[in-house]
Image (cartoon, rainbow, N blue to C red):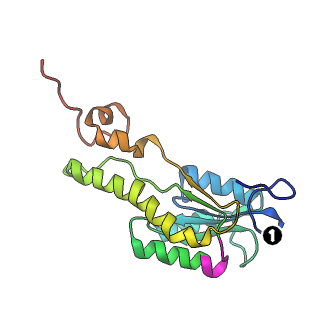
């Protein structure tokens, strides 16, 4: 990411970034947003569940919602598996901030499914989120990523691993996955 005077990344006033993080209502996205807001950055905290997203962005202290133009946390309703939701989120950020310096694709799902869910349904959900959802989000926000230091970060974890999702044997080895038992080897 490009550095500005004062050693801070991004292109906003005073060198602070405008960041959009999907899946920012818990886990890595939540912690990343928390740390950026504490340092004075503006963070649109994406969540597909509106109440949980508002709670995450409205935490006391540095995380409270600020007026337009002021740094701080802002809840952003976005379901990256839904084209209309992603476009609406991009439009909301464009209307308020006019640009994005950093887009962090962090939203994800585990490969664990209901016991009666077919393996192809589990794989479809994982790919729809981790692959097509990330692509959909980049495409929607691309017109806002205009600064010279604009950056896209794609985060992923083991429970959403496409390799694990595609390999039943690996799924059996990853705690938390296991919607299907690993295949039995012939004796």
Kindly give the residue lying farthest to the bottom in the view shown.
95
Is 43 located above or below residue 116 in the figure?
below
> In the image, is 86 to the left or to the right of 100?
left
Kindly give the residue lying farthest to the top in the view shown.
187
Q: Which sits in the foreground, 116 or 4?
A: 4
Is 75 located above or below residue 5 in the figure?
below
Is 126 located above or below residue 15 in the figure?
above
Q: Which residue is mark 1?
A: 13
> In the image, is 6 to the left or to the right of 119?
right
Magenta stretch in the rendered image: 94-99
Label 1 crowd bin: few (<14), some (14–19), many (20+), radius 10 Å: few
Q: Residue at x 71, y 79 (%)?
A: 68
Instruction: Provide the secondary structure element on which disc 1 rests.
Output: helix
Indicate yes or no whether the magenta region holds residue 50: no
Kindly give the residue lying farthest to the right in the view shown.
6
Q: Is residue 61 visible?
A: no
The mark total stands at: 1
> In the image, is 65 to the left or to the right of 82?
right
Q: Position of residue 88 (x, y in %)?
A: 49, 78
Indicate yes or no whether the magenta region holds residue 95: yes
Q: Which sits in the foreground, 101 or 67?
A: 101
Q: Position of residue 135 (x, y in %)?
A: 45, 61
Q: Residue at x 49, y 67 (%)?
A: 139
Q: Which sits in the foreground, 77 or 89?
A: 89
């Amino acid at each position: 990411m490009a550095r500005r005077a004062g050693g801070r990344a991004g292109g906003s006033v005073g060198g602070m970034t405008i960041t959009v993080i999907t899946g920012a209502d818990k886990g890595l996205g939540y912690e990343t947003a928390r740390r950026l807001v504490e340092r004075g950055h503006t963070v649109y905290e994406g969540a597909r569940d509106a109440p949980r997203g508002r709670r995450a962005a409205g935490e006391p202290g540095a995380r409270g919602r600020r007026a337009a133009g002021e740094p701080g946390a802002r809840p952003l309703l976005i379901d990256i598996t839904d084209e209309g939701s992603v476009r609406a989120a991009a439009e909301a950020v464009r209307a308020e901030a006019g640009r994005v310096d950093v887009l962090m694709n962090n939203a994800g799902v585990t490969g664990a499914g209901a016991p009666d869910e077919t393996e192809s349904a589990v794989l479809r959900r994982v790919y729809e989120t981790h692959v097509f959802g990330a692509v959909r989000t980049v495409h929607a926000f691309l017109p806002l990523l205009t600064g010279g230091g604009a950056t896209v970060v794609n985060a992923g974890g083991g429970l959403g691993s496409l390799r694990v999702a595609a390999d039943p044997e690996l799924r059996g080895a990853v705690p938390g996955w296991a919607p299907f038992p690993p295949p039995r080897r012939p004796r």
